Image (cartoon, helix red, strand yellow):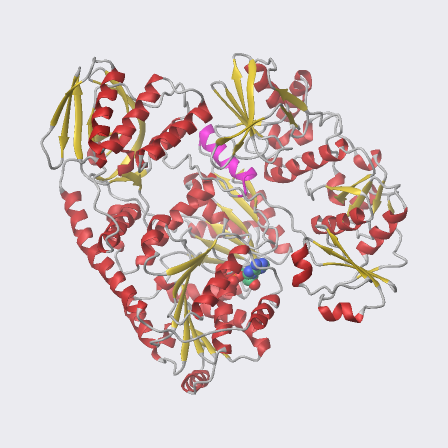
Amino acid sequence: MSFTQARIYEYFLEKNDVEILLVENDKECERALSASEFAGLKSFILPDLRVSFGDDLRSFNAELLELCKSLNEYFKFNGKKLLISPYRTLLNPLPSKRNLKTITLSFAQKIGFGELKDELVRLGYEPVGMVESEGEFSIRGDIVDIFALNLQKPVRVLFFDDEIESIRHYDASTQLSLKEELESVEIVPFLANQSKSEFDLSSQKIASLKSDALISDMASLGFWAIDGFEDYLATYRCAFAYEIELDEESADKFNGVGTLPEAAKFRDFAGSITPEFFEFHQGKEIRVLSQNESQLLAFGVPKSPNITSIITPLCLNLTSSDEIIVSLNKPKKRKRPSRKATIVIDELNTGDYVVHESYGIGRFLGLESVSVLGARREFVALSYLGGDKLLLPVENLNLIDRYIASGGGVPSLDKLGKASFVKLKERVKEKLFIIASKIIAMAAKRELIQGELIALSEQERADFIARAGFIYTVDQEKATNDILSELGSGKAMDRLLSGDVGFGKTEVAMNAIFACLRSGFQALFFVPTTLLSAQHYASLKSRLGEYGLKIYRLDRFSSTKEKSAVKSALASKEPCVVVGTHSLLSLGASNLGLIVIDEEHKFGVKQKERLKELGARAHLLSMSATPIPRSLSMALSHLKTYSTLLTPPEDRLDVRTFVREYEGALIKEAINRELRRKGQVFYIHNHIASMPAAKSELTRLIPHLRILSLHSKIDAKTTEDEMMKFMAGEYDLLLCTSIVESGIHLPNANTIIVENANKFGIADLHQLRGRVGRSDKQAYCYFLVGDENISDEAKKRLVALESNSFLGAGSLLARHDLEIRGGGNLIGEAQSGHIEAIGYSLYLKMLEDEINKLLNQSKEQINDIDMRLAVSAFINPELVGDDRQRLELYRRLSKAKNTAEVYAISGEIEDRFGKLDRYTKQFIELMVIKILAIDAGVSSISSSEQNVFIKFISKEPARLKSRSRDDDDVLACVSEYLRGLSV
Ligand code: ADP
């Protein structure tokens, strides 16, 4: 090992003649920072930026943001300081201090709207519809939202004419303003603060740059065109922190850059820190670095005169003949933006299939404004079979949902005005009643079962986790704790553990298996495929093997001898774990404590029933890669316990994404790059018929490429055998359609290429991209578009994926889809016909209703009220200009359960878009009336001039007369009347 921390610490303890310290990569940056800061030097880090001239920098958005932010902080700091950078970053000219000149917006400042907009664009900020991440801004009415690079949260600037009336932070996930007003806000430019003439000049340069960027603009190519960037190597005093092997070209560039001398006194060290450690080194001066006091206690750091504790987040480990510096902190990982969007704006796109609760499957055409009886209202237009059009009032938007089914095929439209859909729903409902009853009966039976007592001592538990070789995510920790305490509770566990592939479910499950074996019981681990059995067997071997525990496997590939070994082990009552496919079902165990089952939905009904018979007192842990829909989880929580892993392990990197036109040379380069590092490639080609052509094209590009083609027409067994070979490295590239097996962990495949990406929905693209990047290697994703005409809108949506590799609205949507599908899986039972016919959303909604009804959770509610009030009520497009955002607000308002929710959304609209105008206010009032009406058992409300007519489900209708025929009077009259009924 090289003693890099020792070197850096020792050097900077004495000297301060280096301005920039060069290291190998991001990880080394963190190590160097701990050493230099502990030596007393304020330090700043640049990200590893591995680009070459002409690259589309959109795919490196995160690095550039960090770069500008860091440089700005570095320049701003007055005092002894050091900039630490991966050496490759400095191979390119970078923004200079002058480039990064900030601007300030202050309370009561006068600045024209247009002027501010231009200024922000010249600062490198991107105009968007809704601001979600750094470097974006949006303007709506009198409101400007800006997410400055230098701020943790975006700001919302409110104007009165051309004067700034207020500046406040707001929460990007909820889009709501925070209370406190700011005096002023400073904005750090992205790349550069350019004057008008500079901006024109660089725009011209960009236009003439040769590049394969899909959109040539400042965000993708500005880095190569902006004037005034500096060669930092020439400008600052640089030094390598340690010897680095450079290629020829770089070596030239770094000619003359020196290297810090070897450390004389200290050495880096990596040992485990235990109470014995301190005892052993009693003769030395020890400084212990720790995040907090409790960490000191947890590690059993003794109180002794030779030990000093220092509270700091730094992580440094050095030793010498008389001194030791150790850190209880874990090495810091690069911070990933872990923002979660809560607002989905693009839930419905024109042309999407939707399901209406009463009319069935139609297609979404868009929003339409229509005058009815002299009043203006908005409707959602849907098209049905034969082109029939349905106008759905926006206040009833809750009656439709996007159509989601498993097949991914094109659903067939229903016919308006036929009762067939209603009949179909009735039939589904009967089926669902039976399913719901079964689920509940099963749960009730389980409730009475005593479980085997499985327990683990604190010591063993900590030891097992410590040997994982990585740090558990918070979710993993919680899931593990919950599972272990349930196993020791005396009741039989029936738990669902869900989480994305590669998020560490198996690791969590192995805790339970370990506890089970240690408590003297046997465990069975069921998997749907031989492939998974091979994978899990390997995991079990590596984690449990070192404890000398017995691990067996049983599947298609087991020999007769192996089979009989498993049989006798299970019969002997000795503690062991057997992982296997359904063939394991026929064996049974004599001393069963735990059943783990992976991807339960892939097992047949009979097989699952057999599973339940295996051990009367055994605990059950089901794992699933598909999340549970939130709606259904409520009902299920009465029946099952569950744990969810939402966070990926820390070492996962964002997937580097490129959106490009289809081009042979690019594909060749991408594949070769992956092959060079001995990795594998997924290649998505979504047409079975043209797959052979795609294959020969790939072979033409790279003659020796070992290609495996798979699609749904190939039988399961062949698919599995071939995938085993792929896993074993016998192929380089998997050419497949998008629906081919996604549930397996293939950490060695880290490049995915998707042909015709523009034909996929954003949610699908997110899911496809999610198949790579499941290890600590940098993963790459190429979304290729054909040369047919793609609208600018579509281009923008695709390109947004490049700079947005982390969680945004898109991934939320992907999750939503997954959840819905997952819900269908959970129910299991071969209901796919019904699901195809009505879509998952409605299917689940109905199931949820049935379960709740059986559990007496809720009465059946009418939520479809016919409202024919002749008043103009709609969210004014002048207030909320973007159709998608308006639609989303309508959707949320229509789903509101009580008036408080409606008012909260109305407050949010005011906050995000400005003061509500008359029409919007009236729409809010209409939504309040809808809710009051539902509570009062109203079936319809209509009006004509001053006369209002209210029909009830089970009582005499009411006639009201309002003060005038004005809209606000009519609304007030209805709402007063309804409020009167509820007291
Ligand atoms: P899943 O069963 O959800 O697909 P696994 O438990 O098989 O996921 O984990 C996937 C890979 O990630 C395994 O190689 C595992 O060792 C590793 N892993 C699990 N948890 C973590 C973690 N917290 N940090 C780093 N690596 C992890």
Q: Nearer the viewer, residue 665 or 131?
A: 131
Q: x%, y% of residue 298?
A: 65, 62
On screen, residue 7 above or below 720 = above
Q: Residue at x 40, y 86 (%)?
A: 571
Task: Classify residue 36 as left or right of residue 790.
Answer: right
Q: Which residues are magenta?
A: 789-806
The verdict on residue 661 being magenta is no
Q: x%, y% of residue 683?
A: 49, 51
Task: Classify residue 737 as left or right of residue 351.
Answer: right
Tell me the quadrant of ligand 1. Answer: bottom right
Task: Classify residue 839 as left or right of residue 661.
Answer: left
The quarter in which the C terminus is drawn is top left
Q: Residue at x 71, y 66 (%)?
A: 272
Quarter of the image where one finds residue 379: top left
Task: Classify residue 19 as left or right of residue 223.
Answer: right
Q: x%, y% of residue 37?
A: 78, 46
The verdict on residue 804 being magenta is yes
Q: x%, y% of residue 792?
A: 47, 28
On screen, residue 236 above or below 202 = below
Q: Residue at x 60, y 53 (%)?
A: 674
Residue 312 visible in image: yes
